[in-house]
Image (cartoon, grey):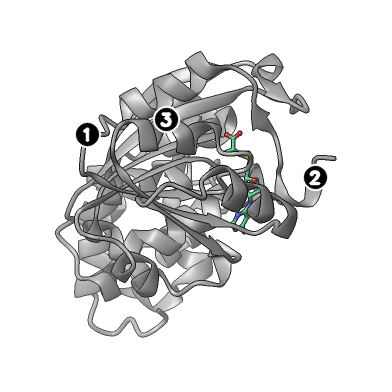
Amino acid sequence: MAKKKWGQNFLKHQSVADSIVQAANVQKGDSTLEIGPGYGKLTQILLNQDAFVTAIEIDPKLCLKLRQKFEKEENFTLLEMDVMEMDPNNLAELMHHPAKLVANLPFNIATPLLLKLLPVRNTWQSLTIMVQLEVAERICATPESGKTYGPLSLVGTLGFEKKIVKIIPPDCFFPAPKVDSCVIHLIPRNSSLTLEEEKRFLKWSHLLFQQRRKTLINGIRMHFPEWYQNCNDILREKYGLRRPESLDFDEWMDLFISFKRSKKNKSL
Ligand code: SAM
């Protein structure tokens, strides 16, 4: 019986599992991490590629099956754990670097996991993950994408080069989820901010995105009154009358630099 609370929607088709491993470009000797191996469909392909596989599975019953299935595989390590309980630094230390993360993720952890890995993203060579289509669209969205563009899109661009690989319909899983899924390939990239500043940038932009249809100057006045007082005319003219949903990533960064420079601002 698949457990809903653990997002257990298992892959039915070999071809879909193959396409995930292909998108991850897994080569012989690669160090890979699989989160949620389930019955091991993806795991088997990774092992067939002669990759080293560390797998983290929360369900004890599945762990039992996986241990039996891969008993003779020297390149396979299984951790019976909740990945969300793990310190992301410890997660990275488990791996030979740079490692590739390859996973058909349970829907409920995709976004929190991405946020968790963001500060340690440089320890990963790539992340090739199956997520809910809507989440993939949010990660990859730009202002032109409409309502999918939001805080998660800024996380996506801040930390990664992104590519939508393939949309996978519900009937490719058992049990079938209610919505489409999508494989995305993410390659970590550096931003111009320190890790501490990245954290502030995400918190700050999240607040300003809350009134996505109001003008930015409204949001600034509401959330950052000191900054509002010090906002110069250029800033008001350049961004004040725009809506948060219309600013692309570079414009958000430009605005953040102005926020950082605003000396009196102590609100974040
Ligand atoms: N990889 C398998 C496949 O493609 O058929 C299973 C994918 S299924 C979408 C998600 C898997 O993640 C399940 O095996 C589930 O038990 C496991 N899982 C769910 N939450 C987890 C967590 N917090 N930590 C580790 N594994 C988790």
Q: Where, quadrant-wise, is the C terminus in this rendering?
A: bottom left
Count of marks placed on residues: 3
Q: Position of residue 88 (x, y in %)?
A: 40, 69
Element under label 3? helix
- Residue named by callout 1: 27
In which quadrant of the rendered view does residue 30 lie?
Answer: top left
Question: Is residue 106 found left or right of 28 in the rendered image?
Answer: right
Distance CA(mark 3)–CA(mark 2): 25 Å
Distance CA(mark 1)–CA(mark 3): 11 Å
* Kind of residue indicated by mark 3: Ile
* Kind of residue indicated by mark 1: Gln
Question: In the image shown, does 186 or 85 lie closer to the viewer?
Answer: 85
Mark seen at residue 4: 2
Q: Can the viewer see residue 174?
A: yes
- Residue named by callout 3: 45
Q: Contact (CB < 8 A) between labels 1 and 3? A: no
Element under label 1? loop
Q: Position of residue 195 (x, y in %)?
A: 26, 71
Q: Where, quadrant-wise, is the N terminus in this rendering?
A: top right
Task: Give the mark nearer the N terminus: 1 vs 2.
Answer: 2
Question: Is residue 123 found left or right of 8 in the rendered image?
Answer: left
Q: Is mark 3 within 8 Å of ligand 1?
A: no
Q: Can the viewer see residue 151?
A: no
The residue at 80%/45% (across/down) is 4
Q: Position of residue 163 (x, y in %)?
A: 32, 28
* Kind of residue indicated by mark 2: Lys
The residue at 35%/50% (across/down) is 75
User: Callout 1 environment at 10 Å: few (<14), some (14 to 19), or many (20+)?
Assistant: some
Mark 1 or mark 2, which is nearer to you? 1
Question: Is residue 82 found left or right of 61 in the rendered image?
Answer: left
Distance CA(mark 1)–CA(mark 2): 33 Å
Name above or below for residue 123 compared with residue 143. Answer: below
